[in-house]
Image (tube, helix red, strand yellow):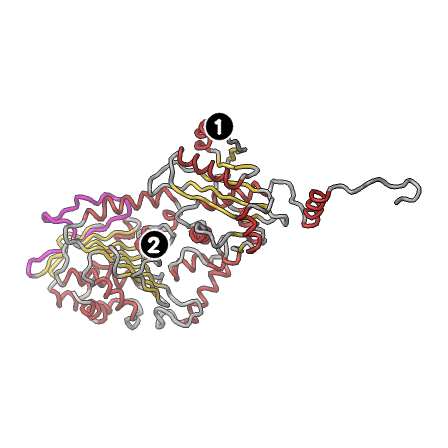
Amino acid sequence: MLASTVSQLARTVLAQRYDNPQPTPEFHEELWELCCLDHDKVAIGAPRGHAKTTAVTGSYTIAKIVFREADHVLIISDTEEQASEFLAEIKLEFIENEDFIQMFGVKRLVKDAATEVIIEFTDGHRARLLAKGAEQRIRGRKWRGKRPDLIVVDDLENEELTNSDDRREKLSKWFYGSVLPAGGDNCIYRIVGTVMHFDSLLENLMPDENNEHTVTEDLRKYNLQQPWIACKYKAHTPNFEKVLWEEKFPPERLKRIRDDYQRKGEGDIYAQEYLNEPLSTDNAYFEPRDFRPIPEDLLKRYQEKTDGYPTYIAGDLAISKSKKAAYTVLTVGKMSPAGIMDVVDQVRGRWNSLEIIDQLFALNKLWSPEETFLEAENIQRTMEPVIYREMRDQGYYFTFTGETPVADKTARARPLQARMKAGQVRFDKDADWYPDYELELRQFPKSPFKDQVDASALLASKIDTMSDPLTAEEEYEDQYEEEFGDFDMGRDMVTGY
C-alpha cells in the first residue's frame, strides 16, 4: 500500500468526521511514508497534540483494513480502556460515515464489543480488531486459524510505569516475550508514542545517535537501516525557527505553551511532551555548566602521583554479569587544597564478586587512598571476609568502610549536586570513562543506569565529612618547613639576636 493511498483516504472520506480539521501537515505524510515502508517493524516518537493517533492508529489502520492488506488487527495501549477508545474511534467510521460505508461496501458489525469488533463487507469478507492493554495476555490470539497480521501499539507507556526500574523491565519482557511472538509470520508492527524515559521501551527502539546510519535533522532523527526502522520528531527547534506543524502549532503558540509549563516549574514535562526529551536541559538535575574540567597542570600532577593530596575511593557494587544488570562502579576522587573534589579515575563493569575484589585491589594499589567507601547493603557484608582474606594473601592492606545509603536515589545525589552547582567538583574530561559518565549524570534521574551517580554521590557525601583541607598558604608553610626545617639556632636573651 502506498502512503498516497492513506493520504487520499484521510484527506477526503475520513476528514469529514474530524473535529476542526486542519490541512494535512507534511508531518502526517511522513508518518504514512514510514508506516507504508516494506519493513515489518517501524517505531515512531512524536510530540503530544500532533494527531499521531489519528494518523497512524486511525487512518493507516483503517486503510490497511479496507484495502484488504490486514484482516486481523491488534491494537495495544497502556490500558485496555485506552486501547478500547482507539478501537471505538475506528469503529465509528464503519457505522456512521455514510460515504465511507458506501465506498468500501461495509455491510454490518458481526461483533460489537468494547474490546473486539468484527466487520463484515458486502462481498462476505470479514476483518477483526482487538483492543488490549499493557501486560495483558496476548499470545495465542488466533481468529479463523490465523494470528494477527497487523499490530499497532499506541502510547504503551505512562509516567508511573517508566519511573519504575522493575516495571520498565517487566514491560520490555512482556513486549518481546508476548507481543512480538503474537503476530503471524508476515505480521506488520507499527509503534507510535512519546518518549518518557531514557530507558523506556520506545526510546530503546529510537535511532541510536552513535550509529553510522542515523540521520539527525532539525526536527527529526531517523534510521532506516536498523532492525526497527525508527524516527523521532520534536515540535520545534530550540529557537522556534522551525516547527513541525505550523498550521496547528505556530511558534507563538508553542512559546506560550512552553512558558506556561516553565512558569509552573514543569519544564521537564514540556521537553518530554513536545520535544521527545525526557529531561529539559534548562532545569536538569545536573546541568551542562556543572561539568568543569580539572586544570591541565594539576591533572598532570594527579597522573604522575606527585600532588600529595588526600585520595578517596567510593564504590557502588553489583554482583552480576547479566547484560541487563546494574554495573559495579569504583570512583576515585582527590581533595584539592581549595576543598574541590576532583574525580580522577573510574572503573565500571559487570563482574562477579572475585572480579570486583580484583578491581578494588588494583585501584587501591594505583591510587593509595586514605580510605575506601563501599555501599554496604548485603553485597559488602558478603564480600567483607573475602577482602580481608585477600589482604592477608597479598600482604597488602587498605582501609574500607561500609556505608548504608539513603534509599531514594535522588535524595542520595543531593551532596554531589550541591557541590557541582557550587563549582566544587571537577573532572578528567579526557579520560576514556568520562563520556559515558557525563551522559549518565546529565540524564539523571531518568538515565537507564544510576550506578555512576551513586558512586560519585557517596564520594561527595563522605568527602564532605572529612576535615577541612589546608589553605594554599598553610600548604606552602607545611612544604617550607618540611624542606628547610626549623632554623632557630637560639637567641641572645639580651639583644634578641
Give how far apart the Cα atoms at labels 2 and 1 are.
44 Å
Say which amino acid is labelled 1: Tyr
Label 2 neighbour load within 10 Å: few <14, some 14-19, many 20+: many
What predominant SS class does the magenta segment belong to? loop
Query: In this figure, what is the number of numbered marks?
Result: 2
Q: Quadrant of the C terminus?
A: top right
- Tag of residue 388: 1
**Left or right: residue 127 compared with residue 196:** left
Which quarter of the picture shows residue 61? bottom left
Residues marked 2 and 1 touching at CB (< 8 Å):
no
Q: Is residue 336 visible?
A: yes
Identify the element where label 1 is drawn. helix
Q: Which residue is at the front of the view, 317 or 345? A: 345
Which quarter of the picture shows residue 326? top left
**Is 6 included in the stretch rendered in magenta?**
no
Say which amino acid is labelled 2: Glu
Q: Residue furthest left?
A: 123
Q: Which residue is at the front of the view, 295 or 320? A: 295
Q: Quadrant of the N terminus?
A: bottom left
Which contiguous range is marked in magenta?
123-148
Identify the element where label 2 is drawn. helix
Q: Residue at x 24, y 44 (%)?
A: 177
Up the image or down, 182 lies above or below 207; here it is: above
Up the image or down, 307 lies above or below 194; here it is: above
The residue that mark 2 highlights is 203
Q: Which residue is at the front of the view, 325 or 35? A: 325
